[in-house]
Every structure is written in structure tokens, then in C-alpha cells.
Amino acid sequence: MNTLELKKMANEIRKDIVTAVHSAKAGHPGGSLSAADIFTYLYFEEMNVDPKDPKKPDRDRFVLSKGHTAPGYYAALAHRGYFPVSDLPTLRHLGSYLQGHPCMQETPGVDMSSGSLGQGISAAVGMAISAKISGKDYRVYTLLGDGELQEGQVWEASMLAAHRKLDNLVVIVDNNGLQIDGNIADVNSPYPIDKKFEAFNFHVINIDGHDFDQIRAAFAEAKTVKGRPTAIIAKTVKGKGVSFMENQASWHGTAPNDEQYAIAMADLEKVGEALCQK
């Protein structure tokens, strides 16, 4: 996809995030919207995956360490062809295979169940080690929240990733600056994020997580790195694309009511219309 096509897809994914969370009357829109561009790039440009063969042995792996942002993950998977987009509004409904956190047993395309914060990166490190031991060349990607970096297991896993020289691992941090209790710097500051990963011997790239040219360049650079893992620190806006959700911690885990849903969809429709005129 070219940059314009990626932007259009990301906007569709944002619409489906808002629709799914509104339908569920629960969920996490803020961090799903901030990561929508990353989800889009991973599944439509970066990763070697095949929706027709979700378990193919040589596929790239993805672990959503911040599992509560499943609405964004599911929307990307659906648009990529793993399951019908029309199923997204069943999010969190009884009997749906699209539950509040990803489940690898139930949802096509999900490589690892996640939700307990701080643990997904450990699973990703294990997958990357497995590839090295098996002599496979697939790559492993994991997306963390910036508030999630307050979990000590993140750094234990990072230490091991560098020790094992996992140049097939890319850790992406969705640095939107907000967590459920407010500003991450006020709750328990993980800053400076880039210097911490550098201290753990990662190759670190700082980007604007909404700029597809920067996203593309970062993932391309990661593929050139040998002998150590890469961390991409993506500066993003919580609630990106929805006027009243942007940079508001209150939208970390709140569903819009009918009136708010209408406003949100109108905001995203305007974005879509502007993109169509380019």
C-alpha cells in the first residue's frame, strides 16, 4: 500500500474501533485509536502473514502486549481478511470470539493471548528465541503501552532479549503519554523511554507514530540491525481522530454513548472525505 492507502485504511480501522466499543458498551478506545496507524502498517505492509493460512509456520508473529486495545487489533485483522468486518460489533458480547482481550484459541490470526500487562513482551521474546533455535527467519513484533513499561517483567524480558541478541525482535511502544490513572509521568514515570531501552542494549528509533513515512522508515531500519533487538518508540495521541477523545485519559476505558458515537463517526467521516480528495 502507498501512504495514502495506509491512511485511508487506518481511518476505517478507527471507525470500526469506535463502532465496536460503542456496540459493546465497554472497552478501550483511547489506546486503540492511538495505535491504529501501527496496527495498519504491521498488517498491511510489514508482516509476512496470510489470512488464508493463519498458522503457517514461517509467518511473522505479533503479540499485543497491551491486550486491552484489542478493538484496534481486531479491526486490523478483520480488514486484512482473517474474519468478517461485520463481526466487529460483537465485541465483548456473550458467545463472541472477539472478547475484551485477545484469545489465541478463539480468534483467527491471534498468535498469543494477552491482557495481563507486562507479560506479552516475554511471550514475544520466547517466540524470537524459538526462531533462533530452530534456524527460522520469521520476525516477531510486540506492541506495548507506555504505562505498561511500569511493569518490572518488561525489563526482565528486555534484558534477556538483548542477551540473546534477538535481532528478529521489534518492540514497539505506543507512547501516547496517558494511562488509566492519568499522565504516565505523574503516575510512575517511565521516562526517558529511549534511554532505558538503549541501556538494555536495544537499537532505538524514535518516531511520530501517526506519520506513515516515519513508520515505514523505522521498520526498514529495524531489518538492517544485527546482533540486538530494536525498540521503536512511537509518539502518539491518545484517542487520535476523535475530537473529544484526543489526549483525554478518561477515554482509556470508556465507551461512547449514542450521541458521542455520532460525533466520533462524523469526525472520522470528515477525515475520510479529506483523504479522498488527495
Image (spheres, rainbow, N blue to C red):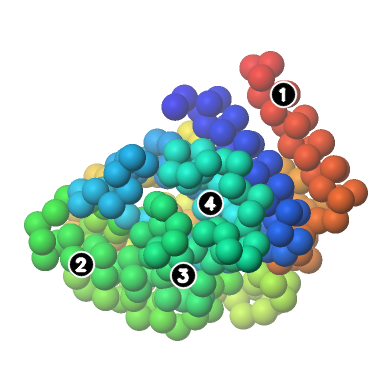
Residue type marked 2: Ile
Q: Quadrant of residue 272?
A: top right
Q: Is residue 239 visible?
A: no
Numbered disc total: 4
Q: Of 221 and 35, which appears nearest the observer?
A: 35
- The first of marks 4 and 3 along the sequence is 4
- The first of marks 3 and 1 along the sequence is 3
**Residue highlighted by disc 3:** 114
**Residue highlighted by disc 1:** 274
Task: Say above or below: 265 vs 201.
Answer: above
- How packed mark 4 is, by other alpha carbons closer than 10 Å (few <14, some 14-19, many 20 or more), is many
- For label 1, the SS is helix
- The first of marks 4 and 2 along the sequence is 4
Pinpoint residue 3: horizontal percent, then vertical percent: 51, 28
Mark 4 touching mark 3, by CB under 8 A? Answer: no
Residue type marked 3: Ser
Seen as rendered, the residue at the extreme right is 259
- How packed mark 2 is, by other alpha carbons closer than 10 Å (few <14, some 14-19, many 20 or more), is many
**Residue highlighted by disc 4:** 74
Mark 3 touching mark 1, by CB under 8 A? Answer: no
Depth check, mark 2 against mark 3: the one in front is 3
